[in-house]
Amino acid sequence: MKAFRGLIAKIQEINSRYRAPRIQMSGAVRLSLMALRLYLFALVGLMVYKFVLLVTQG
Amino acid sequence: MIVDWLTLVTEFVGMTAALAIFRVPPWITVVAVIVLMAVIVLHGRYWTFEKLALLFCALNLIYIPAAFLVHPSVRDVLEQGLIPNFAGGFNGQLFFFLMANIGTTIAPWMLFFQQSAVVDKGMLEKDIPWGRFDTLLGSFVTVVVAVFIVIVTGTVLSGVDIDSAAQAAAELMKTDRYVGTFLAIGLFDAGLLGAICISLASSWAFGEIFGWAHSLNTKIRQAPWFYATYFFTLVTAGLIVLIPHAPLVLITLFVQVIAVTLLPAALVFLILLLNDRAAVGEYCNTRAQNLIGGFIVVSIVVLSTLYGITVMFPNLIH
């Protein structure tokens, strides 16, 4: 339990360290990047769905 | 990290399939590979690893003599190799295989591997031109080897329904024992090389993020977490391959496709970093480099989108 709490604390520390991006980006670029990431994850979701479909259908 | 690990699973799929052609049971392949990789990382320094990796790279050239053994028709190579020919038309399967092909050639782990390898190797600013030459040469040789693989398989297996590289090697064994053996050795070698690099890329990345010591030049006592993550990813990926009746070929293809779908997320950050003059100074990207990088990102996103559309509406694109 102690090790688990330590891991959570470490992850929080890492997240706070990288909260502000080191690369200079305007708000529009940051927003576009977030949109791109969400879009790519949606596509990956579709691919996982297709994979499950193929496996279950044999 | 998940995609890295999944790609590592596919490398084990390739290696076990390649040695299965020589009737080696998968569990022996997995154990032997893990032991070999342990020896490589535990009994050496970065330079030892790099020399061994270069040796494995050189072994991939085995496809070149294999291509000459099958006596391909030069006319067929030029006609069918240079002129795009989509016999089935533009459909989901074509987009899927195009993406899987891109995914086998360039994947997110390669970006992380290269930056960590440059650091572990101890390269300095003066080494940048050689680093660029190294990357350019590697890219060129990769394409040359890929061309020869296509020539071998396209010549001997034209019209044969093939599901995997291992099946291709097994079919080639029936036609020409030497060519089949070459292809199987090449497949195992590619899997081994990929496995070494991917597991290292993951361990380096974990070390960098968590602030652990992460170098091949350190001993286990100096960098325990670096080696622990290395072996954890390696062993778990190897165990997946041993699951009975797992759809390994399907897993391999889908992992490559998912890897290439997520690639733009990493590539865009790389392009942004290469345009940050404060960080890279005089090595900032030129307009032509940005155009090429942008074109690659857009092409991958368009291709992924087209495949996504065919998943949602299977009858829309024929």
Image (cartoon, coloured by chain):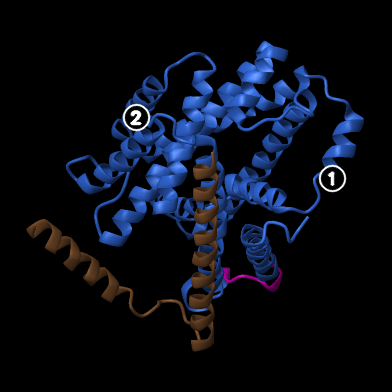
**Chain colored blue:** B
Q: Earlier in the sequence, mark 2 or mark 1?
A: 2
Pick the front one: B314 or B247: B314
User: According to the colouring, which chain is brown?
Assistant: A
Image coords of residue B206 (percent x, y): 31, 55
User: From this viewpoint, is residue B51 visible?
Assistant: no
Find residue B235 and report its image quarter: top left
Amino acid under label 1?
A: Asn
Q: Is residue B187 above or below residue B230?
A: above
Q: Which residues are magenta?
A: B283-288
Res B186 → quadrant: top right
Report the residue at 70% width, 70% height from top. B291
Q: Is B131 left or right of B81, judged from the image as shown?
A: left
In the displayed orientation, state which residue is furthest to the left.
Answer: A2
Of residues A18 and B138, the one nearer the viewer is A18
Image quarter of the N terminus of chain B: bottom left
Quadrant where the C terminus of chain B is found in the figure: bottom right
x and y percentages locating residue B46 in the rendered image: 38, 40
- Residue B222 lies, with reference to residue B76, above or below; the image says below
The answer to if B201 sits in the magenta stretch is: no
What x and y, as percent, mark residue A43?
A: 55, 63
